[in-house]
Image (spheres, helix red, strand yellow):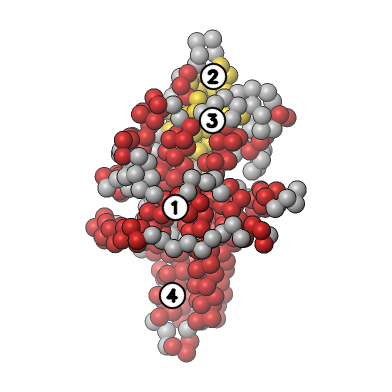
Amino acid sequence: MTALLSTFQLTTLPPHAIAFRAQVRAFLAEHMPALPPETRARSWMGFNAGFSRALAARGWVGITLPAEFGGAGLDPFSRFVLVEELLAAGAPVSAHWIADRQSGPLILRYGSAEQKARYLPAICRGEAFFCIGMSEPNSGSDLASVATRAVRQPDGSWRLNGRKIWTTNADRCHYMLALVRTSGTAQDRQGGLSQVIVDLHAPGVTVRPIHDLTGDAHFSEVSFEDVVLAPDALIGQEGCGWEQVNAELAFERSGPERLYSSVVLLDTWLAALRKLPAGRRDTVTAGRLAGHLAVLRAMSLAVTAKLAAGESPVVQAALVKDLGTTFEQSIPALVEAALGDEPALAADGALYRTLAYVTQIAPSYSLRGGTREILRGMIARGLGLR
C-alpha cells in the first residue's frame, strides 16, 4: 500500500484554475435556481436541461474537449474546479453529467473523425445527453459477464439484443454508450467485448424507469429487441471494449464528484450548528469530517494531475473512489447521531428533510462506478496481491 500511496504526489491548483473559480461562482449566482437543501442534495440526480444548456453556452459542458469541437479546451484542473463548485452549490448537473465526464472524452480518444464531428459538438452545445450501459440483470458489477450482443449484418450494420439495468437517466437521454458482446460468449469474459453508441429513440429500444427508496426514478432498465445500429455505431476497435471501458471508468472514479455527494447535507448541518450556542456545537465531529475531506480532496487532485499529464491512473482512481465513497456514506450517519444528541437540531425541518433523502440514497454511492469488492480487487491487483 505504501508503494501505491507514494504515487499520489501533493498537487496544488495552478493559478489559472484558481482564477477560474470566480467565474464559476459568478455563473452560479446568475443561473442557479433557488432550491431548498433537500432538492440541492439531489445535485447528481438533478436533471435540468435548461441549466445544462446555459452551462454549455459558456463552453463548460465538454469543458476539456478541444475548441474545434465546441469545447472550452481547458485542462482537468479547470474541470476539477467546475465540478467542485457545481456540487458544493447543489446544482442540477445530471442532464449533461455523463456526456461531459465520460462519453465525450471517450469519443475524443477512441472515436472516428466522423463520430467526433457528429457527437462532440452536440455534447458541447448541451443537445446530446448520454447514459452508460454497463450493468446487466443477474450480473451485479461483473462487467465481464456481459451478455447483451451486437451481431454484424451483411450490410455492415449491427443487430442489438439484450438488456441493461441501473442506467441513470436512460428515459431522458438521447444516446447510450453501451458495453456489448460482439463475439464469443459470456464465458470468454473480457474477450469479444466492444462499445457501441445506441440511439435511445430507435425502434426496438424500450426504457422502463425504476423507482428507488427516495421515490425518484433516475434509474432505468433498458431492453433491446432487434435494434438496428448503423455500421459506424462501433466506437474504437471491435473486441477492445474492455480496455476502453476501463479508461472510461477512470474518468468516472477520479474526480471530486466521488467526495461531495453528501456535501449539501454537511453544509446544511454546519449552518444549523452555527445557530447553537458555542458550547453546544459538535466541533469535534465537524473537525474530523473537515480533516478527512481535506486529505481525500488532495488525493483526488493528485489523480487530476495524472490525467492532466496524459496518464490513465486506473488504480489510483479506484482507491480515491473507494475511500471517497466511505466518507460520503459516513456523513448521514454522523449527522443522524448529532441530531440524537442535540434535540434543537431536529427542529430544523430543512436539515431533517435533507438528512432523510441522503440517508436513503447513500447506499447507492458504493454501487455506482463499481462496488467496493470490484474496486478493492483492482487495488489488490495494482499492489501485486492477486
Q: Nearer the viewer, mark 1 or mark 3?
A: 3
Distance, label 3 to label 2, CA atoms, is 14 Å
Left of 188 or right of it: where is 70?
Answer: left
**Mark 4 and mark 1 residues within 8 Å of each other at the beta carbon:** no
For marks 3 and 2, the one nearer the N-term is 2
- The residue identified by callout 3 is 195
- The residue identified by callout 2 is 159
Q: Which element is circle 1 on?
A: helix
Residue 136 point in image, percent of width and height: 61, 36
Q: Which element is circle 3 on?
A: strand
Q: How crowded is mark 3: few (under 14 residues within 10 Å), some or many (20 or more)?
A: many
**Mark 4 and mark 3 residues within 8 Å of each other at the beta carbon:** no
Q: How crowded is mark 2: few (under 14 residues within 10 Å), some or many (20 or more)?
A: some
For marks 4 and 2, the one nearer the N-term is 2
Q: Which of marks 3 and 2 is in front?
A: 3
- The residue identified by callout 4 is 270
Q: How many marks?
A: 4
Amino acid on which the number 4 mark rests in the picture: Leu
Distance, label 2 to label 1, CA atoms, is 33 Å
Residue at x 44%, y 63% (from the top left corner):
12
